[in-house]
């Protein structure tokens, strides 16, 4: 006799905690967008739209997770997709962080905001687009404007 395992479904309170975390991420990205707008005269190559795009991605992910939370256990595919998208969002935010918080870059005032998001280590890159090359290349490859 073979046993089948059901995919564990998140409890309602776990979904609410995740949604609250994503809401906090959206608010922090909004603050980062403000810092970047103020830093534009000193860093003219900084893509001001990027924090806004990341915020929109986080909001869409939250909306999708909300729907999944309202119909738990129907299909593991969307839940796995949401988990993957959350991981990719964190990586994309780490790439954006590398544009203003890397070694040799001028301080723009967003360092503590990025740290509050508890992102993975800043990715390294070998592109040719200036000091933000690794972050820009990775984000452009994923369809974000730079």
Image (tube, rainbow, N blue to C red):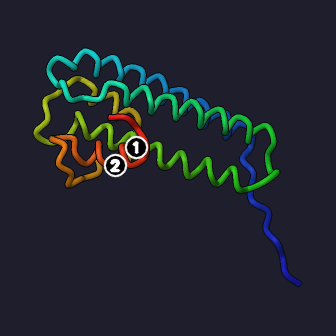
Where is the C terminus found, in terms of image quarters? Answer: top left
Helix, strand or loop status at disc 1: helix
**Residue lying at 20% horizontally and 29% vertically, measured from the top left:** 45
Residue sitting farthest toward the left:
104
**Residue lying at 40% horizontally and 38% vertically, measured from the top left:** 144
Residue sitting farthest toward the bottom:
1
- Residue 44 position by quadrant: top left
Residue 112, image x and y in percent? 30, 29
Horizontal side, residue 43 vs residue 19: left or right: left
**Residue lying at 79% horizontally and 63% vertically, measured from the top left:** 6
* Disc ID at residue 108: none
Residue 120, image x and y in percent? 37, 48
Label 1 Cα crowd, 10 Å radius (few <14 / some 14-19 / many 20+): many
Work out how far the residue at label 1 is from the one at label 2, CA to CA, in angstroms. 8 Å
Q: Residues at badges 1 and 2 in contact (C-beta under 8 Å)?
A: yes
Horizontal side, residue 59 vs residue 8: left or right: left
For disc 1, the marked residue is 92
Mark 1 or mark 2: name the one nearer the start of the chain: 1
User: From what the image shows, is residue 65 above or below residue 44?
Assistant: below
Horizontal side, residue 54 vs residue 99: left or right: right
Residue 97, image x and y in percent? 30, 37
- Residue 31 position by quadrant: top left
For disc 2, the marked residue is 138
Residue 11, image x and y in percent? 74, 43
């Amino acid at each position: 006799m073979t046993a089948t395992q059901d995919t564990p479904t998140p409890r309602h309170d776990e979904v609410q905690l995740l949604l609250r975390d994503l809401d906090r991420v959206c608010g922090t990205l909004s603050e980062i967008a403000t810092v970047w707008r103020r830093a534009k005269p000193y860093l003219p190559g900084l893509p001001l739209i990027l924090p806004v795009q990341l915020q929109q991605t986080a909001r869409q992910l939250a909306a999708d997770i909300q729907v999944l939370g309202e119909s738990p256990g129907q299909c593991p595919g969307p839940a796995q997709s949401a988990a993957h998208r959350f991981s990719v969002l964190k990586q994309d935010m780490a790439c954006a962080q590398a544009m203003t918080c890397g070694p040799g870059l001028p301080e723009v005032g967003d360092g503590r905001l990025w740290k509050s998001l508890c992102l993975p280590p800043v990715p390294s890159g070998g592109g040719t687009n200036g000091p933000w090359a690794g972050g820009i290349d990775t984000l452009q490859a994923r369809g974000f404007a730079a």
